[in-house]
Amino acid sequence: MHQFDLLLDKLTLERKVLLLTGADEWSTHPDPDIGLRSMVLSDGPSGIRGVTWDERDPAVNLPSATALAATWDVTTAYAYGAVLAAEARRKGAHVVLGPTINLHRSPLGGRHFEAFSEDPLLTADLAAAYVRGVQSGGVAATPKHYVGNDFETERFTANVSVSERALRELYLAAFEKAVVESRAWAVMSAYNAVNGATMTENPLLAEPLCGEWGFDGVVVSDWWAARTTVPAALARQDLVMPGPDGPWGEALVAAVRDGRVPESAVDEKVLRLLLLAARVGALADRPPVPATTTTTAEDGAALARRVAADGMVLVRNDGELPWAAPGPRSAAVIGHNALQIRTQGGGSATVTPPYVVSPLDGLRAALPDAEITWTLGAVTQAGIAALPIARLTDPVSGEPGVRARFLADSGHELLSENRRSSDLARLGGSRPAGTGCVEVSTRYQVREPGTVRLGVAGAGRATLTVDGARVLERELVHEGEVFGGGLVSPPHASVPVELAAGEVELTARLDGVPQGDGLTLTLGEDPAAEETDAIEAAVAAARRAEVAVIVVGTSPEIEREAADRATLALPGAQDALVRAVAAANPRTVVVVNAGAPVLMPWRNEVAAVLLGWFGGQEFGAALADVLMGTAEPGGRLPTTWPATEADVPVLATAPVDGVVAYDEDIHIGYRAWLRAGAEPAYPFGHGLGYTSWELSGLTATPDGVSVTVRNTGGRAGKQVVQVYLSRESSAVDRPERWLAGYAVVRAGAGRAERVTISLPRRAFQHWDQGWKTEPGEFTVHAGFSVTDLPFAARISAP
Ligand code: BGC
């Protein structure tokens, strides 16, 4: 008898079915009669937002997944998961909606920042460690989105056409360890279809997930992904999110009553939900699974800083970095992102950090005696940027921030409150039912008189008044998918306004706001106006300073859920900015603040290039650590970095007639680059660090590789030893070589370490209606990137 059968017996069909759809957007239904409490699910995957999008309820904002992946360090991924679990507990969440472990099939993928790598082994290892970390805190992890959600265009309907072999060797392999080894307690089914069946109804839920892999947890639908009553109920889909409405409810009760769905299917789903509840401590009389971790979670901010530095990839260094102590006497810090650093990508992954250390803040703190200037250089953001909180006063309470008023269509005031941001994403937690109009007003301290473009972002009839005079009135209509898209890239309008120094009263208002999700109101500046002469000003600043640090990048509007990127190029005039500054100051360091590859046509014209990803709330502090050399830029590329778009072997993400054909089969990422003979800007696995390394004494057997790794430089450092396999004259189509194992080595100056990297059997196998090992010899290669492999040895197939 199943351990929860007695509880199940107490439930009527109606009550059972009720449990299988969310109670609201983020939680499940309780059933006090059987001691079942409500469970809260929270995004994820790089911070725990909780049940509201509200700046008054901040969350630790860890670096995004590409930064974590660039550490190549499973110990760090575990620690990252443990911090998320601690955050989840703090926020009352039982289930973390992460990790995102779709693969980097195309660098244009909108959620590339949120996923780990183009390589299934590296992804699988990091995901498994993340899951272990989260669940060590008694909180469920939810690997997502199962499976084939490697792009965003037409994501609700696109059908991925993919071979069984590519599924097994790449896309499913990315999930397998998290389920089989780390025993994930939940998995999220994706929006898209694979080979003709939408994922909430797809046979891949049964096999391999539940059968072969033994998954005993809950399959949670992606939000609104479950669309049918009978096929989804007959599939191994357990929980429909969000609620309270959805395709199940009364319709499922009726389907059971008239025999279209066996009641046993409902029972099994409920039993799995009860098991999840028991695991996360939401079932009375059953304590939560004890935390298996022996250490308590690291401080979130400290981890954020450590991951940001350890994931930073130094791809070019012309002797510039690290800066010799005591550091430069003057620095020109340049770039929109240097001030407004992008710590995370857009969409459901977004959390509100308690604070953000910008590169400018980080450098000023690290070099207190240096003369440090900031100039804009070029604009990154499209849309309206929030006004700086330090210059806003709530006109009603006199507190910092703004006054937010929520009004009914009748004009009746439903709520008036102080808020600490002029960017109310989703209007936060307190939007009352029946809100038809939202208004934000503030007294804004103008520092420098002149013309600025003030604007409003959000959907509805927008008005903006300045000292009581209406300067803008516009109907703003969101086009495209609201959820995700409407939130991070809402429609906006702006007007030039002449402001005198001193205080000015601003009011932004949206009438006729849409009901439901995706609702946002931002009052702020449209930075596009600031571009005139910005490059000249940056060049002048760079000329006067000892060093120039340019932070280029993208933004959460560009790298986000619900849309793929249109281009890999940096937005705006950033390329021209870098070239102009580099020509003015030979000591120009470029920091790339993007979650995914961007083109860097100037990369060989600057002194150093650091890839910083979406580095989380401590980004600026970590950057200063790396520039000053108190931390090593420990990152190695988890994904190939292209030089031009034309070279990218797998680029297109848009479905053709509703189908995304994965025609390249098993050849994505570096495998595709090798096959095409194309040369990227920087290969998979590449990264320089601050010291030098030597490998020697390689011995190899089918079980593993041992090698001596010596730090031949003058300072301690980190290296990632990578092992690839290849196979000559194979009867099977194979990548030229593929990652089979790796080890993170940290060693002091002059020190050597003998490392052993085990080779899993799977590394030798290919899928052909089952896992097969081709007999004969394989070659094992060891080195520091997929194209820097000085060592090779022959071994027999195990
Ligand atoms: C995303 C998921 C996310 C969910 C809840 C969806 O749109 O695809 O990753 O967990 O929303 O926010």
Image (cartoon, rainbow, N blue to C red):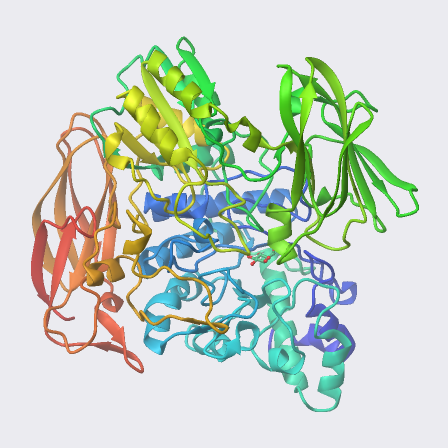
Q: Is residue 34 left or right of residue 786?
A: right
Tell me residue 646's x, y (percent).
Answer: 30, 55
Q: Is residue 479 left or right of residue 67?
A: right
Q: Residue at x 45, y 37 (%)?
A: 572
Q: Is residue 193 left or right of residue 430?
A: left
Q: Is residue 113 above or below residue 759?
A: above
Residue 93 visible in the shown view: no
Residue 503 placement: quadrant? top right
Residue 664 visible in the shown view: yes
Seen from the viewer's position, the closer of residues 37 and 372 is 372
Tell me residue 487's x, y (percent).
Answer: 63, 48
Q: Is residue 422 above or below residue 784?
A: above
Residue furthest to the top? 369
**Quadrant housing the N terminus:** bottom right
Seen from the viewer's position, the closer of residues 516 and 620 is 516
Tell me residue 76's x, y (percent).
Answer: 38, 43
Q: Is residue 177 above or below residue 616?
A: below
**Quadrant housing the C terminus:** bottom left
Quadrant for ligand 1 reads bottom right
Seen from the viewer's position, the closer of residues 97 and 87 is 97
Seen from the viewer's position, the closer of residues 242 and 469 is 469
Residue furthest to the bottom? 259
Residue 373 placement: quadrant? top left
Residue 501 placement: quadrant? top right
Q: Residue at x 67, y 61 (%)?
A: 283
Tell me residue 575's x, y (percent).
Answer: 37, 35
